[in-house]
Structure formats: C-alpha cells, structure tokens
Image (cartoon, grey):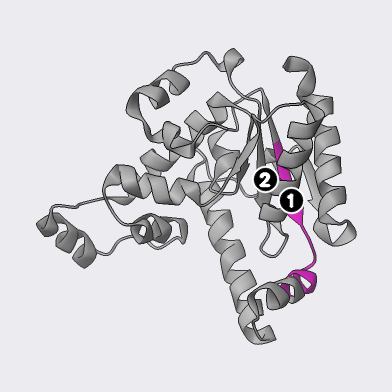
Amino acid sequence: MKKIFDYFDTRYRAEMLGRPISQTGPVITVSRLTGCDGREVAAELVAKLNIRYNTNKWKWVDKDIIYHAAHELKTDAQRVETYYQGFGMTDISQMIMAFSGTFVTDSSVKKAIREVVTSIAHDGYAVIIGRGGVAITREMANALHIRLVAPLYWRVENVMKKKSMVIEKAEEYVVETDEKRHRLIVDFLDKKPLSIDYLFDVTLNRSSFSVEEISSMIMTAYETKLAYRQ
C-alpha cells in the first residue's frame, strides 16, 4: 500500500494533480453525521474491496490529512484541527504567529487540505472519510459519494458508549460536531447551497443496518456506478 506521505511529496502531488480527469480515481467519499461509525464502515469497506478485486490498492484516510497538512505547512496539527473545527484565527493569534515566523492563514490551511485530498482522490483506490472530501471531489466522474445518517438519539447513545460520555455531554458533542462537519463541506463549495443533499449518490441509515451490511451496500453501489470503468 502506498504510504500516505507520498501525497505530501511536492513532485508526486503535482503529478497526481496534473492527471487528466478521465484518468483519475476511483474514489469513495464517506460523509457522516456524528455517531454513525464512519471509520468502522470505511475499514470494512476497504477490506471487502481488496478481497473482491484481489488487490491491496484500496486504503482509507481520515486524520492523516490533518497531521501531514500540518507537516507541510510547518505548523502543529492543532492549527489544522482548529480550521476543521470551524474556528478561524483571531487577529491576536495571527499577529503572534507572524512574529514567530510561523504565520499560517486559514486560506493556506484550506489550500493545503484541498490539494492533498485532491491528489489522494486522483491517485485513486481511496475511501476518504469526511474532511470535506465530498465537496472537494464533487467534479470527479470516477467517484462515489456516500452519506451515513441515523436518528439523533441513536447517535447520542452510540457516542455515549464509545466515548464514555453522560447523555448531556453526548448530546452537546453530537449537535456541535454535526454543525462543524456541515460548515466544512459548505466551505469547500463554490456556492453556499440551502441543502447539501444533492452532493451524495447514496444516503444510508446506519441505525437500520450493521457496519458489515452498510459496507456491503456501498460495495454494490460502487460496482453499479464505477467498477465498469476500471
């Protein structure tokens, strides 16, 4: 499997970004409401794809994008995470960074993320979890965009179990994280739509199916839409 660091090599990324759109992908993006087990679904899906096609090409990426975008920008991961969390830099923090010689703006973080996600998608055989992936890759023909949803209190209960939170904290976490993820997708779009539903090829209710079942349904959608192009 190609190491994620390859996407942060300037020459390699330039090669990926320069590929004709017809020669890019395939890529699957998985956007999810909080508490829908996106990572578990992606891991299961990648395992199924590699077995089905007798390969080890498929990989899934998530927080790697944050850590290595920070490495490229010569800043700490928390700075990139701050952008993902929807908190812009204050005038004071920008001034401090300027004096320290590590000035990194929101626009530079956004540009780095966009280029990294695009190069991963162009290289192909990737399942990208969140990180604005559906918005960044929306023009790619060789892409499948999945949305995982579930009722609010099903997701709250799931978060309570996985993060050992009391219900009040879990409710707050779910609502706030949903808002941040929505804003991130919209931020990578050229226009600000009233709804982002149109971006997704398939929306699946996580509360109705197991992780294994969800991954199998995504496999079917992938083979219906994209596999014939390989």
- Amino acid, disc 1: Val
* Left or right, 55 with reference to 81: right
Asked if residue 187 is positioned above or below residue 82 in the image, the reply reads: above
Q: Are marks 1 and 2 in contact (CB under 8 Å)?
A: yes
Q: Residues within 10 Å of mark 2 (few under 14, many from 20)?
A: many
Residue 108 in view (yes/no): no
Residue ID at (49%, 42%)? 188
Asked if residue 209 is positioned above or below residue 45 in the image, the reply reads: below
Range of residues picked out in magenta: 145-156
* Left or right, 35 with reference to 14: right
Q: Position of residue 53 (x, y in %)?
A: 77, 26
Residue ID at (79%, 62%)? 150
Q: Disc 1 or 2, which lies upstream in sequence?
A: 2
Magenta stretch encompasses residue 146: yes
Image quadrant in which the N terminus is located? top right
**Badge 2 is on which residue?**
30
How many circles with numbers are drawn on the protein?
2
**Badge 1 is on which residue?**
41
Q: Residues within 10 Å of mark 1 (few under 14, many from 20)?
A: many
Q: Position of residue 196 (x, y in %)?
A: 65, 46
Can you tell which quarter of the image residue 73 is in? top left
Q: Position of residue 230 (x, y in %)?
A: 72, 17
Q: Report, in whole angstroms, how far the alpha carbon at label 1 lies from the one at label 2.
A: 9 Å
- Amino acid, disc 2: Val
Asked if residue 66 is positioned above or below residue 96 in the image, the reply reads: above
Residue ID at (77%, 74%)? 153
